[in-house]
């Protein structure tokens, strides 16, 4: 185990269910704070799957505190400093520069699986125990501890963090019932592939000379394309109306012909990007909606939901992964402040610190989607910046760890005054 900076042992034992970005962040931060942590992950092999994922400066500040992580990410992340907008027919509308945000920190865009592998390896290098192939089927708690049932075996700890996404079994014990995800009315096609064909196509080769980021906006549809790794790989996403129901699964193989049908009449360059997509690199995701939860914490305050288990985000928020990371940072800090004797207080303060901020940011996914999908083009041609993403300091110029230490006592006092 490498010798990473960490506080002295707190004596707090933490179990985390799920080794995604929320779970790994919580694990690394708990380790930094001196808590003993074990991660239980359902899959038996963490393969570098997926497509593009974005982290704001509020997340890159977290990465910066983990020795060696940002240096590894710099080798593979998207390096474009601007986003170019077109209408659905291909007419140029505007370019949004992100250069002014450099003072807030680094923007991180890259392959989900590759970035995740860096975090996973960092957790292992720190000596964090990550148990793979663990099917968690139940959560339980009493006054003094909480636990899970994984592969038929009971495991207990001082607290449990449920970080296994929108299907989390932890939602049942927190809410008191088993809620079901609802369709959002939208779905997204996603793809990631080599740009070899695109470089040979006169309509697309200008997109892959270097890293680039382009979007095409139409009625109830937007199509975003990012060339990464010096133009060697392409990621595109197409969000569109979809009335299909949500059952046990909402991820399926995509079909090029289905995407082309949705994009009929759209810019030829967009259609060529779709046609160049290898069939095995195209996926269809149904976007899940959940009403904001009344609480993130279980009745005895021993189990907390974090990340998508607590608050699934629409992709248009561009903050889902970043907010999942803020959850983990905040919880680890709250445990550090409270200490082993006041763990249930720490869990309640975590929720108080996070609840309003995360739901306010969560709502931006809907406002951004509607800003594009229901665009008034007469107004936009007069003022193209109306299409620009809202890049607000209160969201991005933010340090979750610092905020937790500053706000803990105030939030604890507010909780005391309402009890």
Image (cartoon, rainbow, N blue to C red):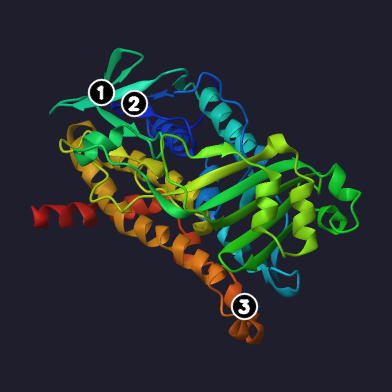
Q: Residues within 10 Å of mark 2 (few under 14, many from 20)?
A: many
Pointer 2 with pointer 3, Cβ within 8 A: no
- Label 3 crowding class (10 Å Cα cut-off): few <14, some 14-19, many 20+? some
Pointer 1 with pointer 3, Cβ within 8 A? no
Q: What SS does tag 2 mark?
A: strand
Q: Residues within 10 Å of mark 1 (few under 14, many from 20)?
A: many
Looking at the image, residue 332 lies above or below residue 61: above
| Residue that badge 2 annotates | 15
Q: Quadrant of residue 27?
A: top left
Whichever of callouts 2 and 3 sits on the residue coming sooner in the sequence is 2
Residue 193 in the image: state x and y as whole percent.
74, 41
Q: Which residue is mark 1?
A: 147
Whole-angstrom CA distance, mark 1 to mark 2, is: 8 Å
**Which residue sits at x=22%, y=31%?**
340
Q: Earlier in the sequence, mark 1 or mark 3?
A: 1
Q: Which mark, residue 385?
A: 3
- Percent across and percent down for residue 26 are 41, 36
Separation of marks 1 and 3 at Cα, in angstroms: 51 Å
Q: Residue at x 60, y 26 (%)?
A: 47
């Amino acid at each position: 185990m490498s010798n990473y900076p960490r506080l002295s042992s707190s004596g707090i034992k933490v179990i985390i269910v799920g080794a995604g970005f929320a779970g790994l962040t919580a694990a690394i931060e708990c380790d930094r704070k001196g808590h003993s942590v074990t991660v239980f992950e359902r899959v038996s092999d963490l393969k570098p799957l997926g497509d593009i994922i974005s982290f704001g400066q509020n997340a890159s500040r977290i990465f910066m505190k983990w020795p060696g992580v940002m240096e590894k990410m710099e080798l593979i992340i998207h390096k474009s400093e601007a986003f170019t907008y077109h209408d659905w027919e291909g007419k140029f509308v505007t370019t949004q520069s992100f250069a002014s945000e450099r003072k807030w920190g680094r923007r991180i865009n890259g392959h989900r699986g590759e970035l995740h592998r860096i975090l996973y390896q960092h957790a292992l290098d720190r000596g964090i125990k990550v148990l793979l192939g663990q099917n968690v089927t139940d959560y339980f708690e009493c006054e003094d501890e909480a636990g899970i049932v994984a592969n038929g075996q009971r495991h207990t700890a001082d607290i449990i963090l449920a970080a296994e996404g929108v299907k989390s079994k932890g939602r049942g014990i927190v809410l008191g019932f088993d809620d079901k995800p609802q369709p959002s009315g939208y779905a997204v096609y996603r793809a990631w592939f080599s740009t070899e064909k695109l470089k040979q196509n006169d309509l697309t080769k200008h997109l892959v000379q270097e890293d680039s980021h382009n979007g095409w906006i139409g009625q109830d549809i937007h199509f975003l394309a990012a060339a990464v790794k010096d133009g060697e790989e392409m990621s595109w996403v197409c969000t569109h109306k979809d009335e299909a129901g949500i059952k046990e699964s909402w991820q399926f193989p995509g079909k090029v012909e289905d995407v082309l049908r949705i994009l009929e009449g759209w810019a030829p360059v967009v259609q060529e990007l779709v046609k160049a997509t290898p069939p095995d690199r195209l996926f269809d995701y149904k976007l899940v909606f959940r009403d904001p939860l009344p609480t993130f914490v279980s009745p005895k305050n021993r189990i907390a939901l974090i990340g998508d288990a607590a608050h699934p985000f629409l992709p248009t928020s561009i903050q889902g992964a970043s907010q999942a990371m803020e959850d983990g940072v905040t919880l680890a800090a709250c445990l550090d402040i409270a200490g082993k004797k006041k763990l249930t207080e720490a869990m309640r303060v975590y929720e108080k610190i996070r609840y309003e901020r995360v739901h306010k940011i969560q709502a931006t996914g809907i406002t951004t989607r509607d800003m594009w999908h229901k665009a008034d083009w007469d107004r936009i041609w007069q003022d193209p910046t109306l299409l620009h993403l809202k890049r607000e300091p209160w969201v991005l110029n933010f340090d979750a760890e610092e905020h937790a230490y500053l706000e803990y006592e105030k939030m604890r006092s507010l909780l005391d005054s309402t009890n």
